[in-house]
Image: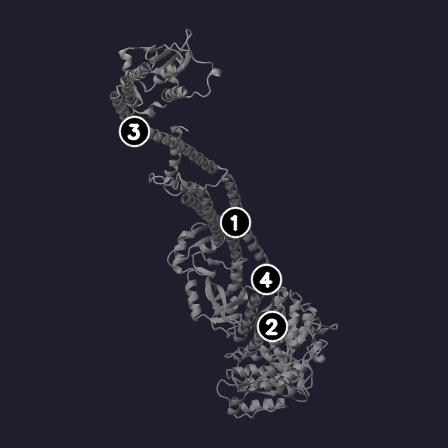
């Protein structure tokens, strides 16, 4: 009997021990299992989209809110936003693209789209529904019947001015449809009336967009033709630069160093916001940005005209997707949402212009903020006979950003005469014409 | 069963009682067997389990610590070389940028306003390109005279050399040309960003013209430092032991100071024991010969030994389960083992000769079975013994009663004889009177105060009385002779030993005869015995077949003597009857010599 007991006891102990060992071994296995599955899921489901844009603070805020909403609706998608002002934006994006390290989604100026597409830096957007978008603006992003970039909104180019400061100096508020002559006459009338350190407008003598508007109004077309020819009208250019030379002499535009320190939308460095100038150029959608810095201080007016309208409508900006994106599908879904979702549109307002999706545009019109409505007014005022926007000839980006800018500074600093400036531009353009 | 066996059995039984009560020294002899068994078994299991838990915890934690520190060491060395390569790249970029001709020219400030503006744009552009193309660079600050205004959020900042930050930097850069600063925050479009900064003075013809500060993203370094591991505490220290960046929990300054003393040599590992305000940790550090940086990883001791602790807990829990199980098992087992002993002890305690016998289980086949059956057998033997004693006692009692009765009857007979004697004297019956007198004497000797042994002298007197009575009856013809020395006469024999034989001779041997002689001789033999012969010259004994069936009286007397002799002496005595060759009967009695009466009749019964 006793022996039997001993035996059964031994058996019992063995069983207990083996259970113990099995339990320990088992738990370890489990741990390693869960660890490996964790790794898989983290690399499987979650997607992080890098997105890059430029803009002012209100646009950043609105865009971030939209991203937040998207993540809320699609918890597997998160964003790594990179945003900044316009300064250096293209350089940064180009550098990243050259390193094949561009964000998944990036904002592009319509003028850059064709260059980027040609360089193979845009992926086809087959997954974005563009059926509600005005076909006219779609063409900018369409190559070989394939969509490579989608427009996000349309804006009008006009002017903004400081209402109170203008009134204080005895100037009458300009009306939509005013002329360049009115503009310069108003400037002249300010002569001697402006307080110390205040100027009428920026030194736009060498500004590409301001002069474009002037040449448009003169009925001389674009600065560079669509087929890539230098098209600055000599007399118009001389007239324009000479007029600014006079304003410079009369102290109606800031001295060169002050002029150069201007940073749009910067609370301290924006010359209009800091009260140093009365007039500056503005896109219709930017009104809200300035209004947020000094609510109610500013008003928009159409670009001055002459024979023709000076202002134009343009698709504000585009979204493109990097061909190197590892999450192109999710990126397209997001762009589609950004373009077509009414909720997104409600958050974004007209930060990137009036939505190009006509249905969405109509739906948010009633909910627009007062500031957005001001922008919309300029858009509507420009619409009837505004200039037809053109992206210009491909390959001329540097001409506008580098050569034109150099001449602008030389004019501003008084280093060159109007005639010399024209010649410099003309000879610089030869390089681009023959590319 | 003899006495020795009984004694042994009792000793065996009483050895169980010695389990309790003897001595305080040996617990085995002190405590109850079931408790002892249970306690020692449960205790053993507990000790084994506790040592298993302890051993598994200590061994596995020690192994874990050593393998972890080895692994961490390698990882840190690897990270260190990666990190120093990365940081060295930044230092080199800073060097080449600070010696860039355009930059130096711009800072030397010998241009007119336009040129300076254009240069600033170019410098900004080239620095921005650097920032764009090297993602780890968050931004670049250039401290200079008369800086251009720059957007405080912008990547590239021109700052005045008279600013507060420049002053702080200049203090550091007085002794050295370049320096790393610890983690701090700078503005960006995306809000404040934590950065590490590398500052270098820019020289032009031995003239200090500015400071180039490259901010690198602390998060990138942090990510690199984190590597694939998460939830780790790591530090980067520079050559002087100043903390550059930390991930996870940062140790306090005093703690760092204490650690730094222990961080000798290139790489190593040490343990910080838990103290007030200090968490017990394992510190692994790595300093590479070609690196200016030291990487330190701090692992909380608890986290390190968590696995071992878990293992120990699991083993402990399983063990507690096992203990509970074994406690019940041992409890049951010890009960099972102790129960038969208890039963046996109870059986012994409650043992009674009368009444129901304790019922001991019969299904045990092991030692308990032997014990039970042994006990049972011993009980049976004891009972047998008891029964035999009871029988003997019964016999003795009866004998005593008989003797008492015998004491009473002779007195009655004696008195009656006396009366008869007087009646015979009165009636002139002298012969009858003499017979009655002799009878009375015979009775007196026969009684002998109830003694069983009497002297041979008395015995011979008794026989002579009987013979005289017979002679009186016969009137003549009956003779006898007695030979016994006075020495012999003093010896003792059982009473009434001779009369039956004499009676037998007269009644049977001389039946129908007119004369007869009886010779009685008693003598000592060489072997220390007495030899008693009774001879007659009668008819002798009839062969067996011719003996009358009905006659029993004479036979009774002789048988009685034989039985008594057998009882008193056993083999030592003998009684033989035979026919003499010359006619008549010869009785030879051999009996051991007795110089005194046996003290106790029992004693003579071997």
**Relative to residue B241, is residue A39 drawn left or right?**
right
The number of discs equals: 4
Residue A204: quadrant of the picture:
bottom right
Q: Residue under circle 1?
A: A20
The residue lying toward the viewer, choosing from A362 and A91, is: A362
The quadrant the C terminus of chain A occupies is: bottom right
Q: Residue under circle 3?
A: B408
Q: Secondary structure at mark 1?
A: helix
x, y percentage for residue B554? 40, 19
The residue lying toward the viewer, choosing from A217 and B285, is: B285
Disc 1 and disc 2: Cα gap in Å?
47 Å
- Local crowd size for mark 3, using a 10 Å CA cut-off: few (<14), some (14–19), many (≥20): few
Colour approach in the figure: one colour
Q: Which mark is residue A73?
A: 2
Residues marked 3 and 4, same chain: no
Q: Secondary structure at mark 3?
A: helix
Residue B588 position (above or below residue A363): above
């Amino acid at each position: 009997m006793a022996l039997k007991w001993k035996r059964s006891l031994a058996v019992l102990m063995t069983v207990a021990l083996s259970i113990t060992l099995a339990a320990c071994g088992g738990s370890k296995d489990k741990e390693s299992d869960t660890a490996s599955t964790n790794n898989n899921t983290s690399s499987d489901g979650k997607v992080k989209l890098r997105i890059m844009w430029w803009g002012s603070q209100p646009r950043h805020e609105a865009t971030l809110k939209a991203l937040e909403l998207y993540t809320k609706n699609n918890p597997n998608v998160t964003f790594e936003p990179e945003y900044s002002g316009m300064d250096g934006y293209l350089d940064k994006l180009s550098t990243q693209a050259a390193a094949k390290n561009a964000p998944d989604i990036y904002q592009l100026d319509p003028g850059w789209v064709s260059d980027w597409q040609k360089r193979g830096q845009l992926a086809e957007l087959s997954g974005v529904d563009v059926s509600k978008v005005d076909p006219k603006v779609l063409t900018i992003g369409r190559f070989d019947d394939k969509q490579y970039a989608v427009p996000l909104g349309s804006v009008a180019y006009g002017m903004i001015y400081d209402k109170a400061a203008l009134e204080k100096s005895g100037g009458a508020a300009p009306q939509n449809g005013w002329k360049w002559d009115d503009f310069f006459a108003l400037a002249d009338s300010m002569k001697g009336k402006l307080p110390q350190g205040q100027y009428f407008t920026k030194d736009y003598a060498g500004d590409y967009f301001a002069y474009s508007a002037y040449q448009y109004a003169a009925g001389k077309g674009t600065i560079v033709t669509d087929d890539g020819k230098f098209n600055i009208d000599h007399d118009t250019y001389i007239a324009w630069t000479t007029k600014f030379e006079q304003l410079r002499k009369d102290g109606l535009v800031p001295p060169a160093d002050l002029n150069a320190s201007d940073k749009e939308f910067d609370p301290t460095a924006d010359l209009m916001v800091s009260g140093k100038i009365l007039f500056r150029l503005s896109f219709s959608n930017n009104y809200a940005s300035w209004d947020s810095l000094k609510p109610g201080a500013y008003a928009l007016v159409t670009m001055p005209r002459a024979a023709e309208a000076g202002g134009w409508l343009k698709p504000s900006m585009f979204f493109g997707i990097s061909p190197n994106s590892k999450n192109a599908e999710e990126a397209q879904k997001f762009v589609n949402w950004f373009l077509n979702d009414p909720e997104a549109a409600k958050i974004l307002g007209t930060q990137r212009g009036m939505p190009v999706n006509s249905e969405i545009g109509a739906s948010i019109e009633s909910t627009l903020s007062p500031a957005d409505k001001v922008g919309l007014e300029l858009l509507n005022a420009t619409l009837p006979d505004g200039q037809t926007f053109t992206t210009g000839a491909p390959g001329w980006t540097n001409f506008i950003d580098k050569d034109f800018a150099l001449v602008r500074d030389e004019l501003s600093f008084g280093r060159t005469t109007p005639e010399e400036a024209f010649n410099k531009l003309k000879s610089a353009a030869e390089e681009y014409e023959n590319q | 069963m003899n006495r020795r066996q009984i004694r042994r059995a009792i000793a065996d039984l009483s050895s169980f009682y010695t389990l309790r009560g003897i001595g305080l020294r040996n617990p085995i002899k002190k405590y109850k067997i079931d408790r002892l068994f249970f306690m020692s078994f449960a205790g053993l299991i507990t000790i084994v389990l506790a040592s298993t838990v302890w051993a598994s915890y200590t061994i596995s934690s020690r192994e874990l610590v050593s393998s972890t520190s080895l692994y961490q060491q390698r990882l840190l060395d690897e990270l260190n070389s990666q990190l120093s390569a990365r940081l060295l790249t930044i230092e080199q970029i800073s060097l080449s940028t600070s010696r860039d001709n355009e930059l130096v020219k711009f800072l030397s400030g010998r241009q007119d306003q336009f040129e300076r503006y254009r240069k600033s744009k170019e410098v900004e552009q080239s620095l921005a390109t650097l920032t764009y193309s090297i993602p780890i660079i968050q931004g670049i600050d250039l401290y200079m005279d008369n800086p251009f205004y720059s957007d405080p959020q912008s990547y590239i900042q021109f700052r005045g050399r008279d600013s507060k930050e420049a002053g702080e930097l200049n203090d550091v850069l007085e002794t050295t040309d370049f320096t790393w600063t610890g983690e701090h925050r700078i503005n960006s479009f995306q809000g404040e960003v934590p950065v590490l900064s590398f500052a270098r003075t820019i020289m032009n013809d031995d003239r200090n013209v500015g400071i180039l500060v490259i901010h690198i993203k602390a998060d990138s370094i942090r990510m690199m430092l984190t590597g694939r591991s998460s939830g780790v505490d790591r530090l980067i220290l520079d050559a002087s032991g100043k903390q550059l960046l930390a991930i996870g929990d940062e140790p306090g300054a005093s703690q760092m100071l204490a650690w730094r003393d222990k961080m000798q040599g290139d790489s190593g590992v040490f343990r910080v024991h838990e103290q007030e305000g200090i968490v017990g940790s394992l510190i692994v550090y790595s300093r590479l010969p070609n690196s200016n940086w030291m990487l330190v990883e701090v692992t909380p001791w608890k986290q390190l030994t968590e696995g071992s602790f878990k293992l120990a807990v699991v083993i402990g829990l399983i063990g507690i389960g096992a203990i509970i199980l074994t406690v019940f098992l041992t409890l049951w087992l010890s009960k099972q083992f102790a129960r038969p002993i208890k039963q046996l002890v109870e059986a012994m305690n409650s043992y009674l000769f009368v009444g129901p016998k304790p019922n001991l289980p019969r299904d045990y086949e092991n030692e308990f079975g032997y014990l039970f059956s042994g006990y049972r057998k011993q009980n049976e033997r004891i009972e047998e013994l008891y029964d035999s004693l009871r029988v003997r006692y019964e016999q003795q009692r009866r004998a005593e009663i008989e003797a008492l009765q015998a004491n009473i009857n002779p007195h009655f007979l004696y008195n009656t004889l006396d009366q008869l004697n007087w009646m015979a004297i009165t009636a002139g019956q002298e012969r009858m009177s003499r017979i009655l007198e002799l009878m009375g004497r015979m009775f007196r000797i026969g009684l002998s105060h109830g003694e069983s042994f009497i002297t041979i002298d008395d015995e011979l007197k008794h026989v002579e009385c009987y013979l005289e009575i017979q002679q009186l009856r016969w009137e003549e013809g009956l003779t006898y002779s007695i030979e016994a020395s006075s020495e012999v006469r003093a010896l003792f024999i059982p009473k009434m030993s001779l009369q039956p034989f004499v009676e037998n001779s007269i009644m049977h041997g001389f039946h129908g005869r007119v004369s007869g002689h009886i010779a009685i001789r008693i003598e000592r033999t060489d072997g220390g015995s007495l030899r008693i012969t009774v001879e007659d010259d009668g008819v002798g004994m009839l062969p067996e077949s011719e003996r009358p069936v009905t006659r029993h009286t004479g036979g009774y007397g002789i048988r009685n003597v034989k039985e008594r002799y057998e009882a008193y002496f056993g083999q030592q005595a003998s009684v033989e009857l035979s026919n003499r060759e010359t006619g008549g009967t010869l009785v030879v009695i051999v009996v051991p010599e007795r110089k005194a009466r046996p003290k106790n009749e029992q004693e003579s019964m071997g």
